[in-house]
Image: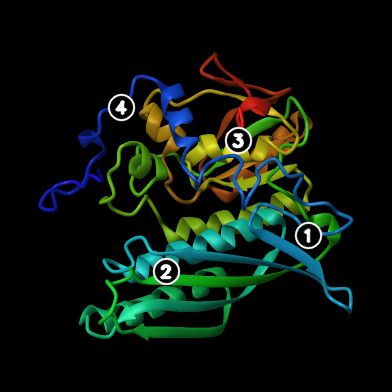
Amino acid sequence: MEKTTDNNKPFSIDQVEEPKSTKDIIYNLMANPNLAPINYFNDFSEKGCEMENLASDDTDETGAFTTDDGHIMAMTTHAYHHHLEEDPKIATEILISRAARRMICFGAKPIVVSAFLYHINTADPNGQNIAAESKKGLENACKNFNLKVSDRKIRFDYFSDFGPVPPTLIISMMGSVKNKEDIITRNFKTKGNNIFVIGKNHEDINSSEYLEFYHEIQNSPFPVFDIKTEAKIQQVIPKLIDKKIITSASPVGKGGLFFSLLRAGMPAELGFDITTDAEIRRDAFLFGESMGRIIVGVPEKNIDEFIDVMKESKLPFFILGHTTRGEIRIDDESYGFIDKMTSED
């Protein structure tokens, strides 16, 4: 049965007892269709971006293509319904930030966005407020990320014959790639590369797949999010790519750090050996979905240059661990091998 927290008492991570077994969390979340490594629509183990076909089968939700006149373009589509009724402005900013973060990690420059707001109930006095605040969020995000708006539409629905459908915002973002050599993927490339996280970890499990699927708690606030930090992070990634300091870049998304690492490692069957932060609950560190974090792969020879660029940016960053031949290790404990982390085994 679905659980909710007391509506009169704000949700806090302290209301959730931290599970003793991290392995139990991992294999439980493997059954979540949003996180399952292999499902009928998206296969994490696909090879992803190939330079020959410019990511025609990329699984990073960011595809690239070449126009007839030789320009390289990229496109990504995202949808969001969490908290759209409670705080549509912030919800919209989060959605735009996620899309721009993915595109930046691909090596593309976001240029333009179109937004479609669906399932707004005309009988609900809050309907017009959702539309107005979503527009404010769209405009503020575009200002922070220097984006143009190509189109925005809204659909007002009548729910006389059917139950209410949660309002949903869908955005499509288009970007350009200056040079083919600038294209980078989330996939880990070689054994032994250092894994860094740009951004700051928080003791936060709000609105995460972990909280909703494992603990069955649906009612929680936004994850930690700051649009100014997002904008700064999305300025430093192009510098790291341009200087060829990093070999991979992956936004921390659904499933938190652990599943983002899993998605980065599966294409080449590379594992990871990481150390968690003793000052943050392990479940929050591994499965929390706070915004503003990007996982990057840094070869040993580039570490000094990476640190110099990051210090200049004044953004927080930390070393998480390194890639392995396939074994997954967390705090010196083995969790098996990445080629076995599929729903088919």
**Quick one: SS at disc 4?**
loop
Asked whether the viewer can see residue 231, the reply is no
Q: Which is nearer the eye, 81 or 135?
A: 81
Residue type highlighted by circle 3:
Leu
Give me the residue at 41% from left, 84% from top: 155
Spatial separation of the CA atoms under disc 3 and disc 2: 27 Å
Give me the residue at 46% from left, 22% from top: 23
Spatial separation of the CA atoms under disc 4 and disc 3: 22 Å
**Residue linked to disc 3:** 262
**Side of 290 relative to 145 (left or right):** left
Q: Which of marks 1 and 2 precedes in the sequence? A: 1
Q: Which is nearer the eye, 171 or 39?
A: 39
The x and y percentages for residue 45 are 70, 40
**Residue linked to disc 4:** 18
Spatial separation of the CA atoms under disc 1 and disc 3: 21 Å
Q: Residues within 10 Å of mark 4 (few under 14, many from 20)?
A: few
Q: Which of marks 3 and 4 precedes in the sequence? A: 4
**Side of 93 relative to 238 (left or right):** left
Contact, CB < 8 Å: mark 4 with mark 2?
no
Residue type highlighted by circle 4:
Glu
**Residue linked to disc 1:** 56
